[in-house]
Amino acid sequence: MSKIVLSGIGKSFGETPVLRGIDLTVEAGQFVTLVGPSGCGKSTLLRILAGLEAADTGTVTIGEQDVTRMRPSDRNLAMVFQSYALYPHLTVAENMMTPLKLRDLGPAGRLPIVGPMLARSEYLRLRQQVQTTAEALRIEALLHRKPGQLSGGQRQRAALGRAMVRNPVAFLMDEPLSNLDAALRVHMRAELSELHRRLETTFVYVTHDQAEALTMSDQMAVMMNGEILQYGRPAHVYGAPASLEVAKFIGSPSINVLPGEIDSAGGLSVMGKLLLPDTRLARQPVSVGVRPEHLTLDPNGSFRGVIRHRENLGSDLFLHVQLDGVEKAVILRSHPRILAGTGLEEEVTFSAIADEVHVFGADGLRLHMARPSLVEVA
Amino acid sequence: MPGSRAYLWFIGPALILMFLILLLPIGIAGALSVTDYSLGNTSANFVGAENYERIFTRTTYEKMFGATFRYVFVVVPLTVFLGLGAALLIHSLTRFGDLYKTIYFLPVMAALIAMAIVWEFAFHPTIGIINATLERGCGTWLEAWNWYAAGCERTFPLWLTDRDYAIWTVAFIGVWQGFGFNMVLYLAGLTSIPRSLYDAAGMDGAQSGWDRFRLVTWPMLGPTTVFVVTISFIRSFQVFDTVEAFYPQGGGPSKSVYVMMFAIYEKAIQQNLMGIGAAITVVFLGFVMFLTILQRWLVERRTHYV
């Protein structure tokens, strides 16, 4: 197990910069997710780490070794691709054998037909290794089938098996769940986390799905436009987004952004309503982010709007409420039971939990407020 | 609707056309092949398997099979191999790929009759560019090769009129003319190989180009190869225009280039022996049918991936 360090990674395709000086440290054994919208460079970063793409600037270090100029096969990393990239003409067992054969056998042993006879004991050992991995993933029954005869989930497991079989330093996964149906995706999330706990190996996982990032990772890096905007624990990224872009990207339904301002006394007001008396910030216009779960229906609430749309998910109910002076409807989380009698186009009042709002300056960066509770301590 | 005959209107036209332009002519050819019919005769005599017996016993037809198989088994492997090689090379280029594609594809598009005249000049024993070029090598280290020394001493081969060389020369022109077509098919096959498979091969430890070719390229080209080989076989069995252009009479020196298509043409059209011509046609059809069925079987069985 070794630590992976990417430093100063830059990459351009022609004139277009894709990565702008990325620094990222992945501690040994961690599950790190790179998350971002498509085109943000996360897959390119993973491919640079894998060695499939060469960086224009910067270095990649695995353990103590600089591997920037090393071939992918010498880095001892394993990769699971979005399309699984299983060899369609080989059975699952042969697919899983391939990395072992290419690494452990000489040219003679790899010859067709005579190879297995020349290197008999090696073949036995490799087959045993395949068998053990297959048992761990519960795919023994599929070993003699070809990828074309497998379902999406089974192919996913076979691809995992091919990655696992040679005990790599780290697993790299490029959106491995995006070709699966919704139910299977949720199931595989749990299974991958479980696999990570069992193997205790480093996972670097690329996804555009913030739910996968939040549920599985130890650390997540939010990437946009070739830069890492925030790197930290999922709870921290969700609870204290470093910028408005991160706040908007992480969380579903996405965060509500309302116009607000800090007055000369440091008081934060949103749409003319004072929310926090003293933030110790200088006077300026700000954007205020409030997550749907931090808005509550309240007969005495200070905000008033008209219900435009309701989404009942059974466990939660999301109301889209149109406020005067805000273009986008505000989304508010509630419970179906509470709202049983409320219909569309009705007026509701609600309030925001003041402790939970996020304030962003004109440049989109988070402003650190002195929270009321912290003020008392100080 | 039970009892409705609407389905007849759907399959009828296709069935009628297939019967009229495929099955009926084959049937007629089959029927003629057991007679001694000549065009213009009002009747014909039933001769049984006599025509077939001739095909499989007379030396003329032995030469016919010899020439055909020599041609086919030189042209097919070489066009397939060169087509694949050219496709791999062009596919690896970042620039000028289209230029090379056009150059290699030109012979496929050119009218072979016209090209045959050009080749006839090139192979001409005295004024031809090929022997003239060979003669320039005389007196150099090339003479260490016995064949070359003999050529310098007397004369270089009469490529098109020497019975030891004629079929190979015609086969060479067949290769020259045919491999561009296979190259285009292979290029199409190469572009359809997903890039991620090469990435996976790289991660799995395939270091050399040969490893990647063995693990990804060649297996993924399996379906293309089956198609290319079949098409090449059928095209080579059908060779006619070069032979007709070089040897309008008799199929080359000592009938050494007497290929099947030419035999059919000579017997049935030039000599008006419809019966024997039809019999050769049926044998020819048998070969092509066998190859087609073999291809179907291979496609369905070995290269059925997804």
Image (cartoon, grey):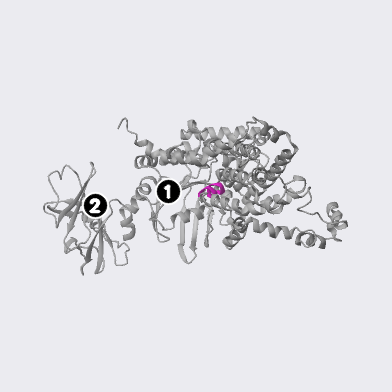
Image mark 1: chain? A
Q: Earlier in the sequence, mark 2 or mark 1?
A: 1
Name the secondary structure under disc 2.
helix
The amino acid type, in three-letter code, at marker 1 is: Glu
Extreme residue toward the front, this view: B42
Residues tagged 2 and 1 counted as in contact (Cβ below 8 A): no
**Residue A17 in view (yes/no):** yes
Q: Which residue is mark 1?
A: A175
In the picture, measured across the screen, residue A373 lies left or right of residue B152, that is left
Callouts 2 and 1 on one subunit: yes
Viewer-nearest residue: B184 or B45: B45
Q: Which secondary structure is most common in the magenta stretch?
A: helix
Magenta segment, which residues? Answer: B196-202
Q: Position of residue B72 (x, y in %)?
A: 67, 44
Is B181 one of the magenta-colored residues? no
Q: Nearer the viewer, mark 2 or mark 1?
A: 1
Q: Position of residue A138 (x, y in %)?
A: 46, 33
In the picture, measured across the screen, residue B16 lies left or right of residue B281, that is left
- Residue at x 44% of width, y 55% of height: A42
Image mark 2: chain? A
Relative vertical location of residue B270 with respect to residue A132 in this rendering, above or below? below
**Residue A158 in view (yes/no):** no
Is B200 one of the magenta-colored residues? yes
Q: Which residue is mark 2?
A: A292
Relative vertical location of residue B1 with respect to residue A182 in this rendering, above or below? above
In the picture, measured across the screen, residue B162 lies left or right of residue B224, that is right
What is the count of numbered marks? 2
Viewer-nearest residue: A327 or B84: B84
Q: Position of residue B264 (x, y in %)?
A: 65, 43
